[in-house]
Image (spheres, rainbow, N blue to C red):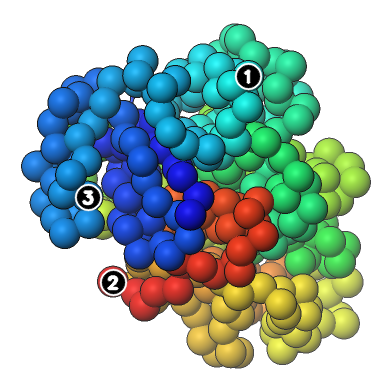
């Protein structure tokens, strides 16, 4: 059994990890941290977990050094993660970090979009954990995994086959993405409270969302050149899920059809257990991936404009965070990648 500990287990991604690991037959959770709930039983705070973690209590983050675990799943806010991760690595532990702290390879870019970095030296050794796009080898051999952001996961999966095959003008990419409210985390905030969100729908952080440099980095690596996308996030009045609508101009408008573009995606993701490419004429719905580690992708060639429109859906808490973390854990430990992750939508 792989012994795991969850740091920041009282938040949404931590809860999701507890939910997934409750049914994982090759890994167990030995410790969970929370400052606000330290000393309280996990099932008192999360009654949905009754029957799975009945004996477990939250501990203070400072107690994490004494925990019997080999893999630490770090669900802390960015900035806090970079303080915890070096200590764990120094103690010989493996870490999957769900924050943004080790995702951006260029330190100046990270510091421009986030904050000063206190463990810059570790950024280079972190493997970016999006196996469907960047392969498994670096993940398998890394002690530190930078788990991708939720919006970058949906957007990159929707664009990678087109960028890799050099079918689109990269300067034309527009990503119009809509996320459920859990993407903002569990901490109380007026802007994401029920009364502010319910029955409304708004764009936010237009041209300045922190996931922009992460998307640019991934697409740039695939293109072998700098890519700069237009990324507009929106807040959907639902609990979980991201739908990304991606627009891009085809380089050669005359030689494609919707069917031929779908075929590019099918071939690109042929061996991927979590990616579903929709049939022609079918577009994905967030409902069909809720609670799963799946990403469903549909597309249409807009022949009037020569633009391809790709729609991807993921659950931000699963493929966009905790499910991806467990997929990465399975890769690190040589397990079947789907272990603990096969589920039907909620
Ligand atoms: N939500 C998503 O869809 C999503 C998707 C991908 C990635 N992520 C990233 O994953 C990380 C966790 O996200 P989340 O949505 O689970 O956030 P969250 O709901 O706000 O939970 C944050 C967790 O960190 C703990 N924490 C906060 N500040 C801390 C500190 N200074 N020291 C120790 N513990 C601290 C909190 O517990 P206490 O306050 O009780 O200590 C809580 O358990 C973030 O970096 C986020 O950007 C989130």
Residue 251 at x, y percent in the picture: 86, 65
- Residue 114 visible to an observer of this rendering: no
Front tag of 2 and 3: 3
Q: Of the residues under marks 3 and 1, which one precedes in the sequence?
A: 3
Please tell me which of labels 2 and 1 falls first in the chain.
1
The residue wearing badge 3 is: 53
Note whether residue 210 is visible. yes
- Who is closer to the viewer here, 104 or 38? 38
> Residue beneath label 2, please?
346
- x and y, in percent, of residue 284 in the image: 47, 76
From the viewer's perspective, is 123 left or right of 190? right
- Spatial CA span between label 2 and label 1: 39 Å
Helix, strand or loop status at disc 3: loop
Q: Residue at x 26, y 54 (%)?
A: 239
Give the residue at x 57% y 51%: 329
Q: Is mark 1 on a helix, strand or loop?
A: helix
Instruction: Classify mark 2 as within 8 Å of ligand 1 or not, answering yes or no.
Output: no
Q: Name the residue under label 1.
A: 90
Name the residue rendered at 26%, 26% in the picture: 59
Mark number for residue 194? none
Task: Assess disc 2: are there few (<14), some (14-19) or many (≥20) residues with their C-alpha within 10 Å of its C-alpha.
Answer: few
* Image height of 279 relative to 287, above or below: below
């Amino acid at each position: 059994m792989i012994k795991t500990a969850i740091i920041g287990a009282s938040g949404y991604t931590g809860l999701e990890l507890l939910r997934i690991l409750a049914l994982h037959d090759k890994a167990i959770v030995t410790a969970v941290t929370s400052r606000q709930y330290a000393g309280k039983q996990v099932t008192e705070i999360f009654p949905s977990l009754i029957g799975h973690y009945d004996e477990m209590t939250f501990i203070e983050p400072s107690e994490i050094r004494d925990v019997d675990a080999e893999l630490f799943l770090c669900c802390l806010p960015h900035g806090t993660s970079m303080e915890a991760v070096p200590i764990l690595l120094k103690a010989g532990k493996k870490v999957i970090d769900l924050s943004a702290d080790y995702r951006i390879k260029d330190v100046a870019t990270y510091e421009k979009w986030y904050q000063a970095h206190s463990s810059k030296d570790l950024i280079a050794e972190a493997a970016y954990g999006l196996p469907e796009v960047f392969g498994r080898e670096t993940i398998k051999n890394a002690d530190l995994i930078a788990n991708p952001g939720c919006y970058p996961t949906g957007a990159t999966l929707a664009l990678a086959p087109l960028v890799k095959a050099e079918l689109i003008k990269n300067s034309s990419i527009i990503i119009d993405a809509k996320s459920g409210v859990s993407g903002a985390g569990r901490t109380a905030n007026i802007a994401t409270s029920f009364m502010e969100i319910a029955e409304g729908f708004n764009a936010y952080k237009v041209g300045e969302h922190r996931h922009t440099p992460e998307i640019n980095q991934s697409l740039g690596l695939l293109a072998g050149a700098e890519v700069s996308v237009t990324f507009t996030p929106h807040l959907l009045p639902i609990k979980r899920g991201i739908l990304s609508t991606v627009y891009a101009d085809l380089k050669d408008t005359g030689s494609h059809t919707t069917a031929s573009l779908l075929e590019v995606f099918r071939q690109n993701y042929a061996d991927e257990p979590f990616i579903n490419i929709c049939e022609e004429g079918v577009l994905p719905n967030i409902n069909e991936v809720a609670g799963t580690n799946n990403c469903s992708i549909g597309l249409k060639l807009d022949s009037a404009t020569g633009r391809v429109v790709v729609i991807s859906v993921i659950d931000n808490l699963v493929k966009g965070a905790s499910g991806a973390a467990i997929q990465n854990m399975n890769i690190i430990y040589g397990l079947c990648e789907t272990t603990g992750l096969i589920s039907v939508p909620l």
